[in-house]
Structure formats: structure tokens, C-alpha cells
Image: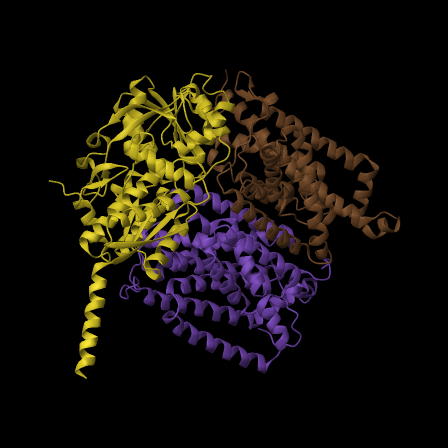
Chain colours: A brown, B yellow, C purple
Amino acid sequence: MFELLGVPPQALFGQLLLGLINGSFYAMLSLGLAIIFGLLNIINFTHGAQYMMGAFVAWMMLNYLGIGYWPALLLAPILVGLTGVVIERLLISRLYNLDHLYGLLLTFGLALIIQGLFRNEFGSSGLPYQIPQSLQGGYNLGFMFLPMYRGWVVVFSLIVCIATWLIIEKTRLGAYLRAATENPALVGAFGINVPRLVTITYGVGVGLAALAGVLAAPIYSVNPNMGADLIIVVFAVVVIGGMGSILGAIVTGFGLGLIEGLTKVFYPEAAATVIFIIMIIVLLIKPAGLFGRTA
Amino acid sequence: MRLKGLIVAIAALFVAGTAHAEMKVKIGVLTDMSGTYADLSGPGSVWAAKKAVEDYAKMSKGVTAEVIFADHQNKGDIASTIARRWFDTENVDVIVDLVTSATALAVNEIAREKNKVAIVSGAASSDITGSKCNANTLHWVYDTYALANGTGNAIVQTGGDTWFFLTADYTFGHALERDTTAVVTANGGKVLGSVRHPFPAQDFSSFLLQAQASKAKIIGLANAGADTTNAIKQAAEFGIVQGGQNLAGLLVFITDVHALGLQTAQGLIFTEAWYWDMTDENRAFAKEYAAANSGKHPTMVHAGVYSSVIHYLKAVEALKNASDGAAVVAKMKEMPTEDKLYGKGTIRADGRKIHDMYLFEVKKPEESKYPWDYYKLRATIPADKAFRPLEQSACPLVKKS
Amino acid sequence: MSAPANSISEQAGGAVLARGGESAASLHRILILIMIVALIALPWFVYPVFLMKVLCFALFACAFNLLLGYGGLLSFGHAAYFGGASYVAAHAAKVWGLTPELAILTGTAAAAAMGTVFGALAIRRQGIYFAMITLALAQMIYFFSLQAPFTGGEDGIQSVPRNPLFGVIDMRDDINLYFFVAAIFLGGFLLIYRIIHSPFGQVLKAIRDNEARAISLGYRVNQYKLAVFVLSATLAGVAGATKSMVFQLASLTDVHWTMSGEVVLMTLVGGMGTIFGPIAGAIVIVSMQNYLAQLGAWVTVVQGVIFVACVLLFREGIVGVLSRRLRLPL
């Protein structure tokens, strides 16, 4: 078969597919972040810790309550989303009239607390979580062997991302949300409970992070540090996509996963930095991000 | 006046007498308490050190010891800071365990600077008794050369002659890859390639993909602890063994086998220095360990900490002085070692303790009769063949004739 | 600035009302004198290596505060200069055999160079975007440090020798080294003090408080911002290079983004935009890390709690509160 720049196609497609899988996590996490920033103007540094909590809640449900993967996929995001609601009501709401960099610092502190507590309780080495029976095994695609579970991750994330986008762009609830971002006072004057909308939105964004965590649990071992380094990359994704843009987050998430996979084939040393290089270039040329609205 | 002087003189004699009869030393267990290597060392090593002090007290009252511990989180800078503080302000005389080669090398250097003692049981790099050796450090249990020699030899001779390495990107991983490559090529095999993964790593998918693409018969895992178990689990996910390749765990502990389960781990072949089910003494030790450590069983590192502390206390008692680290280490090298776990052994000029090494294979699930019954013995590698010969050593302490 | 009322730069200005004038200057003179006396006396009471660690981080925090408190710019990537300089200095001392003062100068030069290039890129944007660019650049330095052969990757640069100072004074004695580090700290601190109270410093405060007006008054705002960025990065480099001499080790921890977070914490706790605040913050945080080290992961939790408490209740920081009580700038 042909070789592209000295690289056999199996290696290329294989890494691209893995990149797409990573991209699913980037997309889901940046989706949650973009929603939260779009409405609350809060840079939610706790997102990584909430992703980790999703994975841990799934693990705890399995090991302490015997609740398996499929129910956990629904229950864990709800539970973690509720903790998000509590955080928003008690802590974050006090910062709304301040510079949104304070929100960054507060959520950074919260992330440290959550991570530290989990590390104390569970240690750093990671806990095993089995791939559910129905998703074990895989397909031989010729250029690589694709584990069924990883294929499921891509498909499920795409569905969730598209569904979220549809809700926000095409439904009435979504319209209220978008309007409240632009002019909360006016929307409040129409009788819509803006603070409650804000709280629910934060909860939903956090829930999305936790959902990504449940998806991750079977393939990346469940450990307290799993969100910490991921969150920095996700920030870069959101900034590139445009901080309030839902579509931007989704497209950029998957796209950057692919680019990272491509880089691993041709120039593996740069794989970790390529996202940041792109972010700097985008910020300098198009400061609002690729899909951002306000310049 | 005279009476007072007499009383003072008697008191002084009394004090001098008691000071002579009992020495106090302080032992610091510097280990990974909660990270990738916590199960193979960690709290278990602290228990082992305390047990050694207890057992020694039954044998002799010449030396009493206090055991303290700290978590270096597998980071060289944290380990350095703790070691420095322990030696400077807390009167610690010896640091033991030292899992993770980067921390071991950093602390060895500080022990040399402060003329104290460091005894490495956890870390693997053969450089500890090679180019980075010094007069204040001992390497107790195993090293990358012994592992490569045992496992590498055995696998190549049974047909695994093309290799691809998955290496943890720090001193230990590099040393293990280097030593195993030497053994593979010396036996006529070929290394087709290698890839370095960050330490610690969660997702091995892209590295495993490269290993698959290389078509090497053996994928050598030059890593340890949770990295090894994660790589093995994910290899199963990607159908690597079904595709005809075999995984070689170059450093595997009984705690890893336990984490993987016999179903996944069966058939793995690797080299270790000690196994709990080999002698009655070992079994008794394991029983006490399990009672205090929620049923887990001790690894060769835990046994090594026990053994090294016993020998240290013997040397300090014989020398009657613990303050000169290099002198204590010299005494430890002079005296042959003997304890209930490792039996008889010696320590060479380069600081390397010599004992037999064992090649184990993991049992199939149906072959295991009781909890933690995981290994069958394939071969014993005698002490004089197991470790790097002194003539090949890069250690400056070894006099070349 | 169309930002909400309490922007970080306004907060950094401090709630202090009066300038203070004469009484402020004399108070500062007394405080600096007390500081010098303490620096001389402390090594006999407190473990010198611990003191040196506090001094390095105090200088790092003061340098960071110069950018945040007086420049009004929140950088989330200062670890790049701190850690980058520590790698260069460690390499200079170990491989090139340079004496400590030359090694530190080399490290500082590297930090200054990075500061110039990164600053030029970052100051084109403001607020959160500025912070994100600095973070991205710092991440690139982190991954570079991970890969580059000279940094030793996960192992770091170990066994950095303590060469004799100026070729003659033995630095292996902790007390000698301590006085060298104390001198560096004092020099850096006094330099920052001078900068803050100079015409340049006044213009910076003007830009921080109302950029539009400063522009309309004819000041080349970008040049000032770049200048303070470079100064801040350079001094952070001095702190990092000195630290690698003290601990004889340069490692990935120094360039990791959590280090950037720690210096923000120190400045926040001590008091943004105050002169002595960062020192207080460094003392608190380093001491806490030291004494709670036995508890392992609890240190992270406590740091997080302090962060949250400071942001919600205590935005002025320790020295900020004191300063408001005394009605004098501190």
C-alpha cells in the first residue's frame, strides 16, 4: 500500500482513530466548559475534578452498591451535577459582580480541595473498572484492531454533543439561555428566573464533565489525578473554539484530537505541545476564537 | 566537699556506663505511600522496618531504633528535601526502601555528602552500584541487570528473539531497557524499536499500537507497578496476544499479579529475589504481614527492607558507633549477611548484595490452591551468576587489578 | 474598562485610601531595617535550608506581584521563568562548571530572554486571554523540559555542585550559602521597591487603573506593559536559579503549571498590590507545606481551602488587611 511521508497507512489510520477517541473526551469536556463560560462568565477550573468525580462515582456505585455501568451512565452525572449546583449556590454566586478571574481562582482552589480529598481517600495509583460485558471485544478493521468500547465512546460522545447543540440552538429553553447570556436584566424582566437558569446551567455543564468521566472509567484507570492535566488541554480547546461557542467547542475538540493523533505519527515529540501552539496562533490572529462571537 | 565529688564521680560513671550499653539509632523509611509504587513498597515497607527493629530487640539489647517514614511521591526533589531535613535536623542515621530510581540516586548523593547511610531496596537501576556508586550506599534486593539477565535470557532462549520496548521515561526505565537490550543482542536476538511513555501513564493505546505495528514477537514492558498492570490490561483490550505477540513483564511484583488476577496474568514469566511461599520462615512472615496489612502479602522489597535493617543494626552494634556512615557501610560489607528471609549472603565492594535470584511463572487459575498462591518456580539463578560481574562494573570503588 | 466594578486590577490597587507620603516612607524604612536584622539573626534559630527556600519563593512571589499587583496582569505561566532559569543555572553549574554567581546570571539571562519573547506575544491580549496565552507558553516550556536531553526529563538535573562563590568562598557550608541567598533576596526586593516608587512605577499604576486615560495622555502603554513583564520574568528567573543552587536539583516540578498556581496563591494570601504582602504569603505557604508534609495529600486540600477562603472573604490578603487598618500602603 502507499506510504505517506514514510509512514505506513496502518500506523496513520490507527493513530488517527485513537486521536478521534481522545477528541471525544476533549469535545465533551470543552462542551461543558463552553456552556458554563457562555452563560456564567465563569472559567470553571473545577471541571477536571468534576470529570474525575464522575469516574469515581461510577466506581463507587459498582463497588459499594453493585450498580453497573449502564445505570451509572445516567446516575453519576446527575449526582455530580447536584454537587455542582450546591457549589454554585453557595460559593460561585458570590463572585458574579467581580472580575471573572476571581471565578478562575475560586474554582482552582475547589479543584485542589476535591483532588486532595480523593487522593487521601483512594491513593494515587488508580482503581480498576471493568469494561461492561456487552462492550468487550473488538473489530479487526484491517489497519488496526478497534476495541468495541472505544468505538462506543466516539459514537456516544458525538450523540451527546449534537443533542446538546440542538437543545441550545433550536429549542425554546436554549433560546432563553442564549438571551440570558446577552441581557440577563431584560430576560429577568420577562419573568424568567435567571438565577435559577444559571444554577441549572452550571449543574448541566458539570454533569457533562461527569458523563465524560464515566465514559473514561473503563479505559483510563480511575485515579484522582485523571482530570488535572487534562483540564489544561481542554482550556486550550475552548479558547481555540471560542469561549462561548458550543459548536466551536465540539468541532475543535474532535479536530484537535485528530491533529494530536496526526502529530503522534509524524513528529511524536511535539504531540503534547501542538495544541498550545495552535492556541497561541489562533489567539493572536482571531482573538475571539475560531467560532467566537464577540471580538 | 569530698562526698559531693564522690557522688558526682559515681553518677558520671553510671551515666557513661549506661550510654555505653545502649545505642539509639533513627531509621527513616522514604517511600511512595500513595502512588504508582505504593503497593510494592509504601506502608508495607514501614511495617517491615518496624518488624525488623522488634525482632532485633529480641536478639540483642545493644541497639535500639526508632522508625520514621515519609512519602516522596516518586519525585526527586521532594525526596531530596526530606532526606536533607532528616539528616540535618532530625538525627536520622539511615534511610531505607527508596523506591523509584530517581529518588534513590538523589538521596544516595545526599547520604554521601552528609556521611550517613542509604540502603536501597525498592529502586532498580543498576547504576546504583555502577557508575553512581558511593561508599555510603548499598543496593539490597535486585537491579535491572539481574532482571534482564534472568528474564531476558529465559525468553530469548525459548524463541522470543525480536523485541519492542515500552519504556517508562526515567532512569529506571532507560536502565532496564538498556540492560535487557544487551542480553537480547548477546543471545542473538534483535530489538526492532522502542517507545518511551511518560511516568506515570494512564493510557497506553498509542504506544501499544506502535508496538503492534512493529510486529516484534515480544513486547518488553520496561516499567513497573501500575504502569505495567495498565499496559497489560490495555494490551488485552487491543487483542495484542491474540494477534500473536507476547508481553514480557520485565519487573513484576506479586502485588501486580494480584491486581491483574490470574486469568489475565497467567503464563507471565519474570525474575524476582524472594517469594513468600518458599520457606516456612517466609510463610510465617507473610502471615504476620497479611494480618497487619489487610490481607496483602509481602513483596521482595518488603522482605528487603526487613533484611537490610537487621543487617544495619548488627553492623552498628559491632562497630558501637552509628555516626560515621561510610564506616558503618564498610562494616556491613565486611560482615556476611544472614536473616530469616534472605538467608545467607554477602555484600560486594560496589555495595551490591548478592543472593540467588529466581525465575517464576504465574500459575493458571486452576493451579492456584489458596489465596496469593500465584507462582511456580521455573529456575534458580545462583548468586554468582545473577548480578553484573565485578570486572564489568563501572563503579570507581572497585579496584581493578 | 467595561469589566464589572471590582476588577482584579482595581482590587490590586488595594483598598488603601491615602498615599501616606512621609509616614509611609518612614514606616517602610523601619520595616526594611527589621527585615535586614531578621535576615541576619534567623539562621541561628531556624534551619537555614528552610529559610533559603522561603527566601527564594518570597522573591518569586514579589516578582509575580510586580506584574499582577502593579501591572494589573494575571499571568498563569510564571513557572516557565522560575523553572526555566533553574534548569539553565543547574546546567551551567554542573556541566560548564560555573561558579554560583555566574550560574545564576546565566539562568536569569535565559528567563529574561523568555520573558521578552513571551511577553511580546502575550500583552497583545488582555484579561483571561492574556492569562491563557501565558499558560500555553508555560506548557510548551514544560513539555520542552520533559523531552530535552539536557534537562534529564523525569529525573531532573541532579547533584548540581555547590561551586565556591567567586571562586573562593565555600558554598557547601549552609550558613555561607544562606547569606549569599539573603543578599540576593534583599537586592531583588529593594530593586522592586525602587521600581514601584519610581516615575516608571507611577505610570504603571496609571495604566493599571485606567488604561484608556493613560493612552490618551500619550503613554506608549504596550511598551510599559512589556517592560514590567520582562522585569517580572527576570526576577522570577533569579529566584529559580538561586533555588537550584540551594537544593542542587532542577526538576519538572519547577516548570509544572501547579507551580504557577502556587505563586498566585502566595501573592493572593499575602496581599496583591502590597509591597510586603508576597513575602508574608511565601512564608505562610512554604511553612505550611513544610509542617504538613507528613500528611501528604492534605497539603493540597489545605492550599485549596486557603485559596477559596481568600477569594471569598479575604481578597486583600494578610498585608492588605493590615494596610487598611493602618491606612498606610504596605
x, y (%) of residue B158? 31, 17
**At 56% across and 42% down in the image, what residue appears?**
A276
| Quarter in which the C terminus of chain B is drawn | top left
Query: Going by the image, does A243 lie left or right of C76?
Result: right
Q: Quadrant of residue C50?
A: bottom left
In terms of depth relative to the viewer, which is nearer, C269 or B292?
B292
In this orientation, does residue A255 appear? no
Residue at the farthest bottom position: B1
Q: Quadrant of residue A241?
A: top right
| Quarter in which the N terminus of chain B is drawn | bottom left
x, y (%) of residue C221? 62, 61
In this orientation, does residue A270 appear? yes
In the rendered image, the vertical position of residue B270 relative to residue C161, given as above or below: above
x, y (%) of residue A290? 67, 40
x, y (%) of residue C248? 35, 55
Query: Going by the image, does A251 lie left or right of C111?
Result: right
